[in-house]
Amino acid sequence: MLTASNLNFKFSLINNILFPLLIVLFRFIPITADFSYVILAVYALFGRQQIIVALFLLWLFSLLNPELVPNTNNSSFSKYITILTCFLSILFRLNFAKIDKITIFTLGFGFFLIVHGYFFSQVTSLSILKALNWTVVTITLLLTWNEMNSSEHESTKNLITGFLLTIILICLALLLFTDLGYEVNVRYFHGILNHPQAFGLTVASLFILLLVQLFSHNRFKLIILINILICTFLVFVSGSRTSGLALILAILFFPILFSLLNIHKFKLFPYIFINKFFFIIASTLIVFMLIFNNTVLSVFSSFVIKTEKINFINLLSSYKVSRSVLYEPMIDNITQNPNIGIGFGIASDLSSMQIKYFKGIPVSAPTEKGVLPLLVLEEVGIYGFTIFIIWAFVLFRRANANGSGSFFILLTLFIFNLGEAGLFSPNGFGMLYLILLSSAVTKTKKSINY
């Protein structure tokens, strides 16, 4: 017979941070690897925070190093069950009278992608399912964050940050004490993840969350600064130029863009510019670069453009060498299909797509594309691109209203997608993009203390 104390114990176990870690442990054990997805789906039924964590773990499972985890028989199908469970879980808790405008606009954008896939895609069923998957994931995240009060919203963000930090510290331990983490690429480190690029973007995502935390606190937090320095080091060892350059560009453009958007407000400069810690850290970095300028330029040069002499021409050449294989076929497709595109989620070279089927239904068809604006133009044409720009504008407007931290996170995520376009790929790295994006653009309810 269940008693109140037994029920409280079970719910406290579900809410405990150890339960998600137990699910991860099951994924590493061959006999329970498939079962871990079932537990993950059930876990998502227990609350709003559990939905976010379940989707985060789904992202982690999709990117784990295959040398470290056992193969699963039905993971391609099981992840959709988890996503559907998350969607149903938030629907049961939803107040339909208070759905946010951004959620409604995103639903409209997703509906356009589905309809476009039906009429214009080169592979109709694949485009519809990819568009439906992206829409369900994004709507689920927006609804879930929006249903949280400010306290729950903050604690969930801190939990995601904590999970990312745990992943990074485990990878750091592997780097320092073992030879693991170089199986995919002998030159660049990827830790427990499946590719240096994925590892670099993960570290960079943690970097922006920690940076926002650093300038959000009223007093200096040395541990946060130490973790930021660790992230900076790991971005370099990953060799991910997309991550490194995106962070640099975001830090450079953020003060300009945020100031211009808020110039009409009473306080001309945002809080970050009058934050004493910002000036302390910025001054220290400037002095460091003046003293060690040759060393800094050498390291930056070797990381970004693989040459000893850094200049604008080399920077452009480096970008062209690394990304031309992705953007040149996209430009060709845009030229041939400027109005309607080739279909949402379709590869630039259709013959190169490796589609996995489950009972005749396409469940996996990864594509690699480098520049988000070109991706949208190529796949849904100029009309779809116009809707996307309006959608992005609405997101930035809300992030700006939410504050400098939200705006910085959203700006960095979009810059990430100029080098690694994963925003529309929730089955891969895009899931983390969407988790962070949705947290930055949702309004939170005020906590009520009784």
Image (spheres, grey):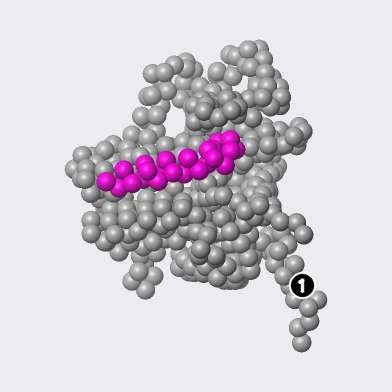
| Residue interval drawn in magenta | 383-409
Residue 305, x across and y down, in percent = 46, 25
Q: Residue at x 60, y 45 (%)?
A: 191
Q: Is residue 25 visible?
A: no
Above or below, 11 against 273 in this view is below
> For the residue carrying disc 1, how many other residues have a C-alpha within 10 Å: few (<14), some (14-19), or many (20+)?
few
- Of 205 and 147, which appears nearest the observer? 147
Residue at the far bottom in the pictured view: 1
Above or below, 184 against 116 in this view is above
Q: Is residue 371 left or right of residue 298?
A: left
* Residue 311 inside the magenta-drawn segment: no
Residue receiving disc 1: 8
Q: Is residue 145 visible?
A: yes
Query: Tag 1, which secondary structure?
Result: helix
Residue type of the residue flagged with mark 1: Asn
Residue 192, x across and y down, in percent = 60, 49
